[in-house]
Amino acid sequence: MQRLGVSVCSRVVRIRCMCSLVRVAPLPERLRGEVDKYGGVTVRLDPAHVLGESEFGSWLHESIKQWRADGRIAVWLHIPIMQSKIIATAAAEGFTFHHAEQDESTLSLWLKDGPSNLPGYATHQVGVAGAVLDEDTGKVLVVQDRNKTINAWKFPGGLSDQGEDIGVTAVREVLEETGIHSEFKSLLSIRQQHNHPGAFGKSDLYIVCRLKPLSYKINFCPQECLKCEWMDLQELAYCSNTTPITSRIARLLLYGYKEGFHHIDLTMRTFPAVYSGLFYSLYHKRLPETYNRNNNLI
């Protein structure tokens, strides 16, 4: 009996040790979720909790019935990557992929009749280039990308990071590619292109900014650039060895350089957003000071 008791106790200890390594999520009667202002429900699964597929399936099924009864319009289900095995269970209930980040997939389910009115995920990528013009010499900074079929002159630039302002992207990309420090002055143009191969078939916005140089010694990145130099603006405007958009923007820049940048600049101002604590950047032609005042204009 003593040996049996020891065996039973040791087995209990082993079971307790195993339980301490894996946390099993308590399963309430239905999934808890946060209701948003649009009448949808957002559910975020705890990545530290391990969910069994059958338990999760029952949990989800009952929750969906309750959400429909409550008049909810949709469900957003965030699943950590380590719990990806339960995605098939959610799909069996009608969920579809909406998007995925590095460590999480987001699924959605429309609960009302008719086609889904849920917004799609990101439809565009945003590329930003910086046209760095030295007003003292009339020269502009240009590069040739490495590993391109045609090595044409263009403005340095790249994709904007999440949460990064357009001007900040332009200054950062110019520094990374050329070693030139610069300052944002204005927005010059926006190109919109659809079904872009480099954007996984999504649409592409390519924004060109006017920048003022704060340094002049080039130290370009050989991994990204084949060549980099200061080129005469007029030469670039009518050069055959350049991209069509670069040539067009160079002519726009030349017009501003000769006739005044107020003809071409879209300047930026920051305003408080309707959401508390947030701000937005607004780009437009400069307003006369009389129109900037907070008085009523007739």
Image (tube, grey):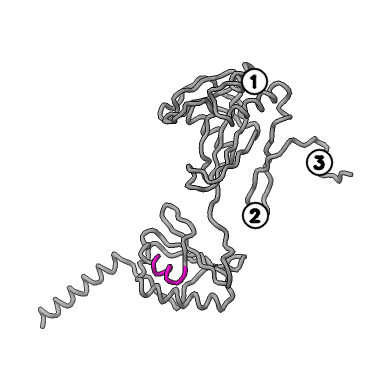
Is residue 1 shown left or right of residue 228?
A: left
Image spot of residue 199 (x, y percent): 49, 45
Residue at left offset 36%, top offset 69%: 51
Circle 3 sits on which residue?
293
Image spot of residue 61 (x, y percent): 45, 76
Where 105 falls versus 115 (above or below)?
above
126 part of magenta stretch = no
| Between marks 3 and 1 in the image, the one whose residue lies nearer the viewer | 1
Q: Quadrant of residue 87?
A: bottom left
The magenta stretch is 87-94
Secondary structure state at the residue bearing disc 3? loop
Say which amino acid is labelled 2.
Answer: Ser
Q: Looking at the image, how many numbered discs can be counted on the residues?
A: 3
Pick whichever of labels 2 and 3 is earlier in the sequence. 2
Image spot of residue 123 (x, y percent): 55, 50
Circle 2 sits on which residue?
276
Regarding residue 179, the answer to whether it shows in the image is no
* Quadrant in the picture for the C terminus: top right
Is residue 271 shown left or right of residue 36?
A: right
Q: Quadrant of residue 141?
A: top right
Circle 1 sits on which residue?
135
Around disc 1, counting alpha carbons within 10 Å, would you say few (fewer than 14), some (14 to 19), or many (20 or more)? few
Give the dominant element type of the magenta stretch: helix, strand or loop: helix
